[in-house]
Every structure is written in C-alpha cells, then in structure tokens.
Image: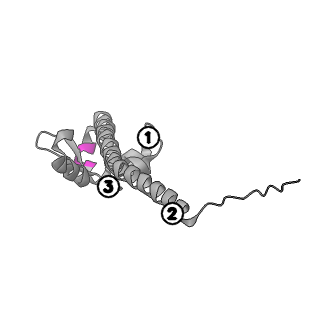
Amino acid sequence: MNTVVIKQKRFITLIEIMIVMFLIALITGVLAYNYQGTLEKGKAFKTKAGIERLETILNLKIAEDPSFLSDVQGQWATVVRDSPLVKNADALIRDGWGYPYQVTIDNGGVIKVTSQKYEDYLHNHPEQR
C-alpha cells in the first residue's frame, strides 16, 4: 500500500498583507510626528549659531575698518561673502528657515543680528530660551 502525500502550499492572504501595511503606516506616522519637533529644534539651533557667527564676522570687520559701522546694514551680506572665515556664505546669510537675517545697530554701536522666525520660535517655545 502506497500512500500519496500531497503537500499544500500556504499563500499570504490579503488580510495579512493589509495588517502588515497598517502596522508599517502606524510606525511611520509615529516617527514622522516625533521627527517634526526635531526639525524645528535643528532649525533653531542653526539660526542661533548663525547669529553668533554673523555678529563675530561683522564685529571683526568693524575692528578692521571702523567706518564700516555706518554701512553695516546695507553691506553686511557682501562682507560675509568676502570673508575668508566663511566657506558657504549663501547658507550663512539665511536662517534655519531660509529667510535672510536682519542686521541692525543699537544706540551704543553694537551690531544686533536677528531672525523673525527664530523670535517666533522662541515665543512659542519659552523653554528654549
């Protein structure tokens, strides 16, 4: 007596595939939600570092040429582009959100570099100050 053994192949069902796709989408959604706050923190960090660097470069230029103080608001981007301390000037003249910095001089002759987006970020996240 010979018995014939028939092997049955098992296929993945549509429901199993849908469950796996749902789990992947759920994990991706959670990661994307957490990643969004990290992007804002990164932009804020880049902007803060850029402000400090710009103030240093402009103060060095004023130390070399004190008459530049009167033209700093209109010529600051040119000074940054011409500075040997800067490798990528186009990235430095814009904040983390891609907007150009504002450069002003206060009554004491001190250069102040600001970013409106960075100020808005600090207003919405007071714990980052």
Judged from the image, the secondary structure of the residue bearing numbered disc 2 is helix
Instruction: Locate residue 62, reporting x and y percent.
Output: 28, 38
Identified by mark 3, the residue type is Pro
Instruction: Locate residue 43, reporting x and y percent.
Output: 34, 47
| Left or right position of 112 against 99 | left
Q: Which mark is residue 100?
A: 3
| Left or right position of 14 against 78 | right
User: What residue is shown at x 22% (from left), y 54% (from top)?
Assistant: 116
Q: Which mark is residue 18?
A: 2
Residue 71 falls inside the magenta stretch? yes
Q: Nearer the viewer, mark 1 or mark 2?
A: 2
User: What residue is shown at x 16% (from left), y 49% (from top)?
Assistant: 123
Q: Circle 1 is placed at which residue position?
A: 86
Of all residues shown, which one is farthest toward the left?
Answer: 107
Q: Tell me which label, 2 or 3, sits earlier in the chain.
A: 2
| Left or right position of 25 against 5 | left
Q: Which mark is residue 19?
A: none
Quadrant in which residue 60 is drawn: top left
The reply to whether discs 1 and 2 touch (Cβ–Cβ < 8 Å) is: no
Q: Main secondary structure of the magenta part?
A: helix
Identified by mark 1, the residue type is Val
Instruction: Locate residue 127, reporting x and y percent.
Output: 18, 40
The quarter of the rendered structure image containing the C terminus is top left
Judged from the image, the secondary structure of the residue bearing numbered disc 1 is loop
Q: Is residue 97 above or below residue 66?
A: below
Magenta segment: 68-72
Mark 2 nearby-residue class (10 Å; few <14, some 14–19, many ≥20): few
